[in-house]
C-alpha cells in the first residue's frame, strides 16, 4: 500500500472538519493536501461565492466535476471535498474511482456552531442559517451515509480523529482498486 500512494478523499457536510483533518492526515502520510474549493478558486481566479453568484450552483458543480477529473494529482494526495461535491448524480462513484473515500460527520448543532463565524459558504448566506443547514443536510444525508466509512468529528481530540481516519484509510487502501470502488 505505501508504494501505491492511493488518494484519500474526505467528504461530508460543511463544517465537519474535512480541511482541518485533511491537512493533518496529509502531513502524517507525507502526501499533498488539496482543498477542492480552494483549488477551484485558484483555477478560475474567483471565490466560490463569486462563482455561485455569476454561474450559479450548477456552474460550480460542473467545476467540481472538472476538478475531480483533472484538477489534482492522481496519487499521493489528501483531498478535502466541498460539502456538496458528491451530491450530483455520478459524483460519489467518480470520487470512489479515484481513491479511498471517508465521510466526516458532526451533529447539526456542532456544524451550526462551527460555521457561524464564516462568510465563505455561499449556500449558508441566508437569514435563517439553522433552517438552511437542516434542509441541506436532510437532502444530502442519504448520500453521505452511502459513502462507506463515517467518522464522527465532535467530542474527540483532533489527533484521535486523524488517527482514526488514517487507520481506516490504510485498511481501505490495502484492498482498494478502481474496479472495486
Image (cartoon, helix red, strand yellow):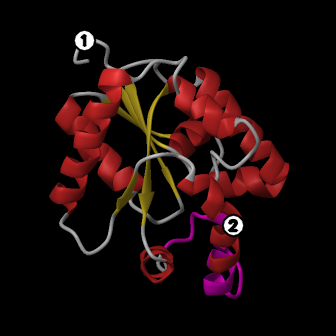
The residue depicted at 53 percent of the width and 46 percent of the height is: 147
In the image, residue 130 lies in the stretch drawn in magenta: yes
- Can you tell which quarter of the image residue 169 is in? top left
The residue depicted at 63 percent of the width and 29 percent of the height is: 94
62 on left or right of 155: right
Residue 7: x, y in percent?
Answer: 40, 27
Lower position in the chain sequence, tag 1 or tag 2: 1
- The magenta segment is 118-133
Residue 125: x, y in percent?
Answer: 67, 74
- Which secondary structure lies at badge 1? loop
**Residue in the foreground of this view, choosing between 76 and 165:** 165
Task: Name above or below for residue 2 compared with residue 170.
Answer: above
**Residue in the foreground of this view, choosing between 78 and 4:** 4
Residue 164: x, y in percent?
Answer: 23, 50
Mark 1 lies on residue? 3
Mark 2 lies on residue? 123
Amino acid at each position: 500500500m505505501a508504494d501505491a500512494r492511493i488518494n484519500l478523499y474526505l467528504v461530508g457536510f460543511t463544517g465537519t472538519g474535512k480541511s482541518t483533518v485533511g491537512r493533518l492526515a496529509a502531513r502524517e502520510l507525507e502526501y499533498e493536501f488539496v482543498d477542492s474549493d480552494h483549488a477551484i478558486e485558484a483555477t478560475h481566479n474567483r471565490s466560490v461565492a463569486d462563482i455561485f453568484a455569476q454561474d450559479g450552483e450548477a456552474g460550480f458543480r460542473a467545476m467540481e466535476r472538472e476538478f475531480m477529473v483533472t484538477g489534482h494529482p492522481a496519487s499521493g494526495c489528501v483531498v478535502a471535498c466541498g460539502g456538496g461535491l458528491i451530491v450530483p448524480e455520478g459524483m460519489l462513484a467518480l470520487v470512489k474511482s479515484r481513491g479511498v473515500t471517508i465521510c466526516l460527520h458532526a451533529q447539526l448543532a456542532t456544524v451550526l456552531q462551527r460555521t457561524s463565524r464564516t462568510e465563505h459558504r455561499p449556500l449558508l448566506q441566508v437569514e435563517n442559517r439553522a433552517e438552511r443547514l437542516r434542509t441541506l443536510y436532510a437532502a444530502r444525508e442519504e448520500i453521505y451515509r452511502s459513502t462507506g466509512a463515517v467518522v464522527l468529528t465532535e467530542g474527540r481530540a483532533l489527533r484521535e480523529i486523524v488517527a482514526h481516519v488514517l487507520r481506516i484509510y490504510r485498511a481501505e487502501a490495502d484492498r482498494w482498486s478502481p474496479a472495486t470502488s
